[in-house]
Amino acid sequence: MVDNSEFDDIPGTTVFTAERSREGFHLNQFCTSLKVPENRERFKANEAQYLEEWPMTAGQKRAVLDRDYNAMIAQGGNVYFLAKIFSSDGVSFQSAAASMTGMSEQEYAQMMLAGGRSPEGLRSIKEGR
Amino acid sequence: MARVMAGLTTSHVPAIGAAWDQGLHETPYWAPVFRGYQWTKDWIGEENPDVVILVYNDHASAFSLEMIPTFAIGCADDFAIADEGWGPRPVPTVVGAPRLACHLAQSLILDEFDMTIINQMDVDHGLTVPLSLVFGSPERWPARVIPLAVNVVQYPPPTGERCFKLGRAIRRAVESFDEDLNVQVWGTGGMSHQLQGTRAGLINQEYDRMILDKMTADVAALRAIPHLEYLRETGSEGIEMVMWLIMRGALGDDVEELHRHYHVPASNTAVGHLVLRARD
């Protein structure tokens, strides 16, 4: 039997497995729809109404409306699909990534300029490395 | 006979494409990224490859989660530029090499690599950013391109070992083609980066440099890296470096490093670039 429990040992990381893909299918399908310009316009005109066209859970819809990317990922969203949302918003990948870390956009940008986030202590919770 | 003469690896960060398209490549932030590709631009002009087999991953542009092919090869006459949410990049349509691509597809499947065959597909930044970095902004891309898409979006991607062996099979298949062609294989993606969660922004320069070194010095070690190690050491998206091993396998046993470039950061990502020549 496949055992993905080791992924939970990597802090601050969600691995997009087939199971998560099942959970997030409609959320990610909604994201895919935003690659069509007319769909982007309809979404922007009335976000809640557009989301009603997709059989997503209430929690997934809430997370999209709130642009809460961690909540979307926790409910099966995949970041490459979620990118269609922030691209439609005109938000950069760096800014969207920053929003998931609890850092301000400026702090995050500064961290990247200084060489990025060190893997030290972030490889494994149980091994503390 | 066609031959795989050389290969290269490069990151394919979307922000690099956006910076290039907006003419920001000489700004203080972007100049160090692009500077490392000048050598390659000069080199490619002399090498003048007929065909590039471009190994990359689609980012929810051509493939949704409806179907998820592990390895897919583009056999079309041409490939339109994808709209990724902000309109298509202003770059030329990618012209394919259907006769070679069909030969590769058939050869690879009979060599036990079960390729998915693509007859129509839009290509996204994963494929077009490497073309811009190496060829600049020509009116038409100077080489024909065979897209080879690898699933690295939904876990698990193919193993590094499997990718390396696919590269070897590509080398055999190219050599059995009846036309004299100078073929290159490009492996794209990486290096360390994580785009999600509270660990976003992870960069592991030491590990990245180890990978750059071992692409020539000890590829056997790279072939053996398990997925969990990529996830821990290089971030959840760094795992796409398995695609580099397809390129490396396609160059044969003995390769020479011609050029190297490494820079942090481009947006969320460590940029890594190698140019390798096959010696066999």
Image: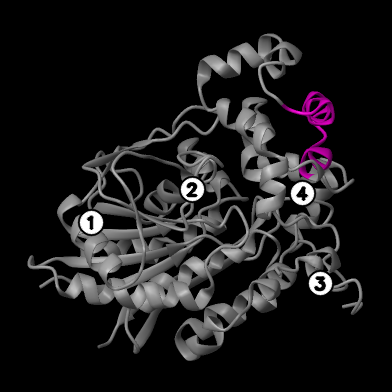
* Relative horizontal placement of residue B10, taking residue A27 as reference (left or right): left
Please, what is the three-letter code of the amino acid marked with disc 2?
A: Asp
Q: Nearer the viewer, residue B55 or B278?
A: B55
Q: Which residue is mark 4?
A: A109
Q: Which residue is mark 3?
A: A123
Please identify, in this view, whether the residue under mark 1 or under mark 3 is nearer the observer: 1
Please, what is the three-letter code of the amino acid marked with disc 3?
A: Arg
Q: Which residues are magenta?
A: A56-73
> Contact, CB < 8 Å: mark 3 with mark 2?
no
Q: Does B7 lie within the magenta span?
A: no
The answer to whether residue A40 is above or below residue B171 is above
1 or 2: tag closer to the N-terminus: 2
Image x and y of residue A39, in percent = 56, 17
Q: Residue at the spot x=68%, y=44% of the render?
A: A22
Q: Residue at the spot x=62%, y=26% of the render?
A: A88
3 or 4: tag closer to the N-terminus: 4
- Callouts 1 and 3 in the same chain: no
Please, what is the three-letter code of the amino acid marked with disc 1?
A: Ala
Q: Which residue is mark 2?
A: B58
How many angstroms separate mark 3 from mark 4 (CA)?
A: 22 Å
Q: Chain of mark 3?
A: A
Image x and y of residue A108, in percent = 81, 49
**From where the camera sits, is residue A77 visible?**
no
